[in-house]
Image (spheres, rainbow, N blue to C red):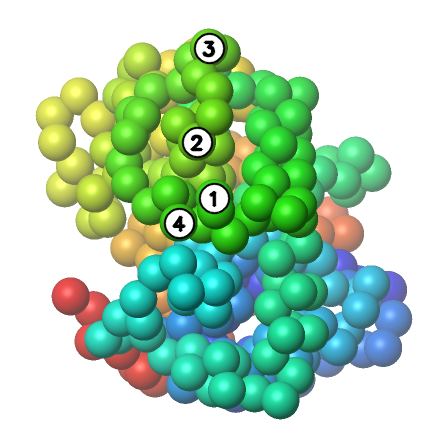
Amino acid sequence: MAIYAVGDVQGCFDELQTLLEELAFGSDDTLWFTGDLVNRGPKSLEALRFVKGLGARAITVLGNHDLHLLAVAQGCEQYRRRDSFADVLHAPDRDELLEWLRVRPLLHHDDALGFTMLHAGLPPQWDLQQAHACARELEAMLRGPHYAEFLRVMYGNEPQQWSDALSGWDRLRFITNCLTRLRYCDAHGRCALREKGAPGTQPKGYMPWFEVPGRRSANLQIIFGHWSTLGTYPVTNVFPLDGGCVWGGGLLAMRLDGARRERMRLECRAHQKYL
């Protein structure tokens, strides 16, 4: 019984199948997915059906592209020029797939393995308990009767900084942005959500979220995706797995139940041109 974490698939279903063949993925094995199962790649529908079909053998957290699919499906956001999940929207099992997707967690923690998985990042003020509580707040909204109302106000970069006093849509938007969009913040936890480049390209005073001094989650082993320009960054206890497969990079996997933390990489052809 092996347990692997896999980075952002983004509709690259064929590449996922090739990677699993190389891993000799078996019927007793389990996969963790860092989110963004869909969009930009050519086979979002096949990717969703496959991961859903794994049942309890797959654990996936929601990413920003997954949330975007849900928002478009609800009529809360427009289908964009570079979106590529029309196959999901027109599938006969659309409703079943979307219902499955919207009840995925935003954060997964396994005490026995000693790993925490999320799609993007954590603000420096959150420890595991706070992160877990905030993720549960957002999950409750997405699983509840007012989730479409939230999806309409989900987009935006404000507020920039965490406060326990945040409430309502502002609080949920900040939680969403951290768990599904965060790359850079400053020493006070102010987020720079527009920044997408590799470290060294960010504005002065900002740093990768996992390099903020005194970060309260520094004791956790965190697996995340979302940041295709980051690479396999050499930081203790941090395991980025978005290899940029859809851009012509690699689809990454890491075995979680072994003694060594080696990443496996499948070289991918570009389905999108990075802009």
Q: CA distance from mark 2 to mark 4?
A: 10 Å
Residue 151 vs residue 63, the one in the foreground: 151
Name the residue that disc number 1 marks: 150
Disc ID at residue 152: 4
Disc ID at residue 207: none
Q: CA distance from mark 1 to mark 4?
A: 5 Å
Q: At 63% from the left edge and 74% from the top edge, which residue is drawn?
A: 95
Asked whether the residues under the numbered discs 1 and 4 touch, taking CB atoms below 8 Å apart as contact, a structural biologist would say yes
Asked whether the residues under the numbered discs 1 and 2 touch, taking CB atoms below 8 Å apart as contact, a structural biologist would say yes
Identified by mark 3, the residue type is Ala
Residue 90 in the image, given as x and y percentages of width and height: 50, 87
Of callouts 4 and 3, which one flags the residue occurring earlier in the amino acid sequence?
4
Name the residue that disc number 3 marks: 165
Name the residue that disc number 2 marks: 169
* Mark 1 neighbour class, 10 Å CA radius: few under 14, some 14 to 19, many 20 or more: some
Q: Quadrant of the C terminus?
A: bottom left
Asked whether the residues under the numbered discs 2 and 4 touch, taking CB atoms below 8 Å apart as contact, a structural biologist would say no
Of callouts 3 and 1, which one flags the residue occurring earlier in the amino acid sequence?
1
Q: At 41% from the left edge and 72% from the top edge, which residue is drawn?
A: 39
Q: CA distance from mark 3 to mark 1?
A: 19 Å
Kindly indicate the quadrant of the structure image that contains residue 56.
Answer: bottom right
Mark 1: which secondary structure?
A: helix
Number of residue marks: 4
Residue 206 in the image: above or below residue 43: above
* Mark 4 neighbour class, 10 Å CA radius: few under 14, some 14 to 19, many 20 or more: some
Residue 153 in the image, given as x and y percentages of width and height: 38, 43
Residue 26 in the image: above or below residue 63: below
